[in-house]
Image: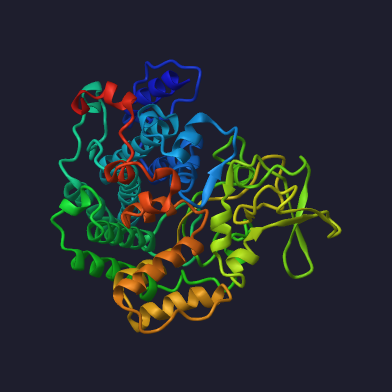
Amino acid sequence: MKTKIKLFALCSVLALGSCSLDEKPYGFYSESNFFKSAADADAAVDYAYATLTFLEYSRGVFYLGELPTENITPKPDESQDATDLNNWNIPSFKTNTVLQYYFTYAFIGINRANAVIQNVPTGDYDQALKNQYLGEAYFLRAWNYFNLVRVYGLVPKHNSTVQTLEQTSAPLFSNLDEMYDLILTDCKKAESLMPVYTIPKLGRADRVAAQALAAKAYLYIASAKEHNVPLYKDMKRDITVMYDSATYFAGKVINDQTTYALDSSLVNIYDVEKPKGSEHIFTMSMDRTGTVEGEYSKISKMFIPYIGGATVYLDNKNGTYSATHDGWSVYQTTTAFYASFDAADKRKTELIVDKVYDKTGVLIAAYPGKILYPFTRKYIDPSFVGDKTSTRPLLIRYSDVALIYAEASGPTSKAYGLINAIRNRAGLGNLMPGLSIVDFRKAVYKERTWELAYEGDHLYDLRRWNRVITDVPEAASITEEQAAFYPIPQAEIDLNASLR
């Protein structure tokens, strides 16, 4: 299967019409019959977004962003690749299929974005639409490269469409400064071209998403350089300027628009029937009505334990109960992480489940016991159809940006106000006033761990704070370089002579 994946990925990247495979090719439409109209361009942009929902890429959000951390552990009989990631089995990483697929599909997404950037300007339709499509393509290229740099560090540079076999052998970016130059330039282009939606568009980005991504990238640089992360510590950028830039772009999200804001209800954020809620700056588009996985989601199956193979019900804390299927027990909450929450924290009491009921409210299983681990209800669809759900990864949400602002700016009154709003929503008191900038940033880091739990971001917080080795027991004996970046997959090195 791995060989077949590489072959059709290569065919799609090159857009070769002569490829004949027994699987749907994941490539581009020919430029000779596409990009002629606004409808064509819109479809091409959708096609670029669709890369994110490929099974191997969408699950990679959690396999890579959560599973290798101290918060989650896999079930004992989960795949060897997942187990190796959890255990930081470094020798296995070169051939780990999770890492291989994530790399492959990120570059398919980049190539699709490059095709939009290259072809939309020549279209014969309204300039405002051209700007929107170009902005979205620049955002997607930046998004995919930001994922790649957080996962692998330096990767090959592709800033135009790959159309020949020779063009697949691109060299690596020369350093992280060059790579972040592209990411941040694309974010700023996207910001200048896209509108702010008055109602979020599910699965599509707008100007606020571009500002949020810029804030995330600037914060990553600043904190990683401050904490002497390999490669980042050699960057030429000034730490203070990077923190200030993260504050600036996060501040634009917070101050310059009215579409997005903190949701007053934690449960509402994860209600699959409210996918355009105020927190949802950039959300993966999945719906239970789809016909293939990727159009619909099975993410819930990964987080929910196997209880008995039947429908179970979760207590909504208001006298009602929500149905869910049980699951596959893949992503299991660790005991230490569950215990780290304050007992009064609603992010524990309302969003982590330790009891399930029948439809009349009679208790049928609890943790510890028949429920093997407390599980998140961030991915619950009461209207599931078999294994098909509308549970969606929240790729950027407002609370993330608010915490970016707080961490980047330090203990200002605005930063305290944002973190306290998040804490108060969770039923907790205000953060201790008068903290030093070092202690304040540590407190924000911890708040991110609880607020963004199970959302695919924690490994990257560990990495930029240089805390993988100290915080993840399975990683205690690896080097800082191994903690900071996964290796480029061997299959990619074999295909690209510039990487050997």
Give percent across and percent down for residue 201.
49, 57
Q: Nearer the viewer, residue 148 or 331?
A: 331
Q: Quadrant of residue 92?
A: top left
Q: Is residue 421 visible?
A: yes
Which residue is most to the left?
236
Quadrant that contains the C terminus: top left
Position of 114 with respect to 235 (left or right) is right
Position of 336 with respect to 288 (left or right) is left
Give percent across and percent down for residue 345.
59, 70
Which residue is most to the front?
477
What residue is drawn where x is 31% and y is 62%? 215
Image vertical order of residue 141 relative to residue 78, above or below: below
Give percent across and percent down for residue 321.
77, 61
Q: Quadrant of residue 288?
A: top right
What residue is drawn where x is 43% and y is 24%? 5
Give percent across and percent down for residue 475.
40, 44
Colour scheme in the image? rainbow
